[in-house]
Structure formats: C-alpha cells, structure tokens
Image: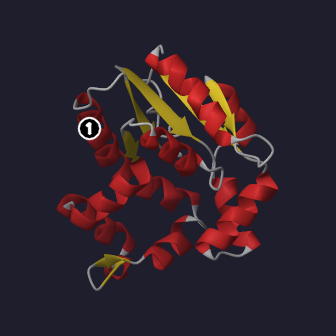
Amino acid sequence: MLKIGITGGIGSGKSTVARVFHTLGIPVFDADIVAKDIVAKDPQVRKALIKHFGDIVFENGQLNKKYLSGIVFNNAGKLKLLDSIIHPATIKASEIWMEKQNTSYAIKEAALLFEANTANGLDAIIGVYAPVEMRIGRVMHRNRLSREEVLNRIGKQMNEDEKMNLCDYVIYNDEKQAVIPQVLELHKQFTGV
C-alpha cells in the first residue's frame, strides 16, 4: 500500500482535495482533526498544556483556542513548545492508523508534513497550491480573522514555493484549473488503473 501525504499552506484547499480523494473511496487521515481529538481526550497532553500555558488554556473543559492562538501565533518559542506537545501523539496516531489501512493507497493530510519531519515515511507527497491573496481571503472568511492575523499565521509556516518544490506532485487550487481532474489523474497513477 502506498502512503501518500497531502500538504499545503493555510487556506490552500488541502482539505478540499483530501475530500475528493475520500469520495473516491480512499481513506484519509486528517492530522488537524486527530490533533484536536488528542487535545480533548489525552490526559498527558492536557496536563502538559495546562503546565505550560496555564489553567485558562481550557475553559469549561474545552480548549480555549482564542487564548492559545493569541499566545502561540505571537511567540515562535511558544508555538514550538505547543508543537512539541501535540505532534508526537498525532504522529503516533497516524502511524497506527496507516498500518490498519488495506487499500491501494491511503492519505495523510497535514499542513506541517515537512516542518514536523513526518514526510520521510511517505511514498509520495502532494502539495496543494493557491495564490497567497486567495489563501488570505479564504482564511479571513472561514476563520473570521483579520488580514493581519492571517498574514501572521502564514508567516509562521514554511514558504509556499519552497514547500511545493519539496512535493512530488502539485495540485493547483487557484480557480483557474479544475481540482477534480487533477485528483483523478493522481488516483489513476496511485491505483495503477
């Protein structure tokens, strides 16, 4: 079975691309969703977050995203600390999940495949590319953030051109090229059909 990664910067549309693969019957591991689940349920992770970010990091038992985002997206050291708490558990969950799949290929969707050093265990990586202004608009609309907040988050991620150069394939989600034919072409390659 091939292990395929999907990555791209915030607002690139990697989740949209992953959903198309899922519609084709391909299992998809969504690292963001699993990380949120781990934060909600893993007592060791919760304990570490409280230790390093204070009791206020959880509000009524739920992660206080606004509080945590305000800290980590304004402090590179705190962001690195947060990643060091959540990434190991998410990586382990993805490895366990991948071993259970029995299709011709399975997909791991993660924004930080290269940054978290998890690209090495994958057979191929698909980058999802969208122009930066399009990404900014999407994230402002989706997350109800200001332009400055989105730019701050983009600035914390790997340079998009550099990331795409590291990928084996690139899907363009720029509203000029249809995404579905690009996905279908890769699906054919990965299934050998």
Q: Quadrant of the N terminus?
A: top left
Reply above or below: 137 against 165: below
Residue 145, percent from left and from top: 66, 75
Q: Residue furthest top?
A: 192
Q: Secondary structure at mark 1?
A: helix
Residue 189, percent from left and from top: 53, 18
Residue at image coords 62%, 50%: 13
Q: Amino acid at mark 1?
A: Trp
- Please name whichever residue, 46 or 169, is drawn nearer the observer in this view of the structure: 169
> On the rendered structure, is 167 left or right of 110?
right
Q: Quadrant of residue 47?
A: bottom left
Q: Residue furthest left?
A: 43
Reply above or below: 61 against 190: below
Could you classify mark 1 by the number of other residues whose Cα lies within 10 Å: few (under 14), some (14-19), or many (20 or more)? some
Reply above or below: 179 against 86: above
Mark 1 highlights which residue? 97
Q: Quadrant of residue 126?
A: top right
Residue 97, percent from left and from top: 26, 38
Residue 113, percent from left and from top: 50, 38
Q: Residue furthest bottom?
A: 60
> On the rendered structure, is 46 left or right of 79?
left
Reply above or below: 88 against 67: above
